[in-house]
């Protein structure tokens, strides 16, 4: 399993509030998701548009946008961004935003980590048998 | 005794209805919370023109994820 997929699987395990999540790059390309491929693409595209619209309505003098929550009666949409990767998630209505952001940010960082190379176990060296009959 | 029980039952039902009505009336509506790199946060209420631009995209994202 790829690192990004593993990070989302862990997110789904630890967060009881996150229903679905998708990780996508700056172009909206899906890198990993808890959804089937077609729905993941639609969700990523919508989340990307949501982020772009939020950047449009913010104050031009404001600092760089790092995360957002769009709350509706049907549920909330969260998007967090780090470097060129974004993680979007949907939750049930009135979630604990702080916890969701914490979980999403942890997952986003885990997804960005490079897989660690494991060292091959050291080979066991067997002592050479002494030739029998030697004096 | 029966009258007391009926009063207590009525009070309990009234309390539950009151809680439900309060929750319905004062439930938080649509809103957009934006968090920035410098630690600041802006909350845009759902009845503002800015939110009217953004909320449809949130609905679309929710629909796509279902």
Image (cartoon, rainbow, N blue to C red):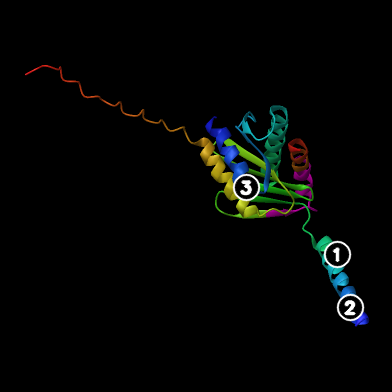
Q: How many angstroms separate mark 1 from mark 3 (CA)?
A: 30 Å
Question: Considering the image in quadrants, where does the C terminus of chain A appear?
Answer: top left
Instruction: Check residue A78 for magenta coloring.
Output: no
> Mark 2 falls within which chain?
B
Furthest residue toward left: A135
For the record, the magenta segment spans: B43-57
Instruction: Name the residue rendered at 59%, 46% in the picture.
Output: A14
> Mark 1 falls within which chain?
B
Work out whether residue A62 can be spotted.
no
Q: Are marks 2 and 1 in contact (CB under 8 Å)?
A: no
Instruction: Kindly identify which numbered label has been placed on residue A15.
Output: 3
Residue A66 left/right relative to A53: left
Q: Are marks 3 and 2 in contact (CB under 8 Å)?
A: no
Q: Which residue does the numbered mark 1 point to in the structure image?
A: B21
From the image, give the main secondary structure of the stretch colored magenta: helix
Instruction: Check residue B47 for magenta coloring.
Output: yes
Instruction: Kindly identify which numbered label has been placed on residue A20.
Output: none
């Amino acid at each position: 399993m790829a690192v990004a997929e593993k990070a989302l699987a862990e997110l789904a395990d630890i967060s009881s509030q996150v229903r679905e999540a998708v990780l996508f790059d700056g172009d909206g390309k899906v890198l990993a998701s808890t959804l089937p491929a077609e729905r993941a693409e639609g969700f990523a595209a919508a989340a990307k548009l949501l982020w772009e619209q939020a950047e449009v309505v913010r104050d031009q003098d404001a600092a760089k946008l790092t995360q957002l929550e769009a709350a509706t009666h049907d549920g909330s949409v969260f998007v967090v961004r780090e470097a060129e990767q974004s993680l979007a998630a949907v939750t049930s209505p009135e979630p604990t935003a702080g916890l969701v952001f914490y979980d999403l940010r942890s997952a986003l960082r885990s997804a960005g980590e490079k897989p660690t190379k494991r060292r091959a176990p050291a080979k066991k060296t067997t002592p050479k048998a002494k030739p029998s009959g030697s004096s | 005794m029966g009258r007391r029980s009926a009063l207590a039952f009525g009070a309990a039902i009234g309390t539950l209805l009151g809680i439900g009505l309060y929750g319905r009336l004062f439930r938080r509506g649509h809103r957009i919370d934006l968090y920035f790199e410098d630690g600041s946060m802006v909350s845009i209420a759902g009845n503002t023109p800015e939110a009217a631009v953004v909320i449809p995209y949130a609905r679309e994202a929710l629909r796509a994820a279902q």
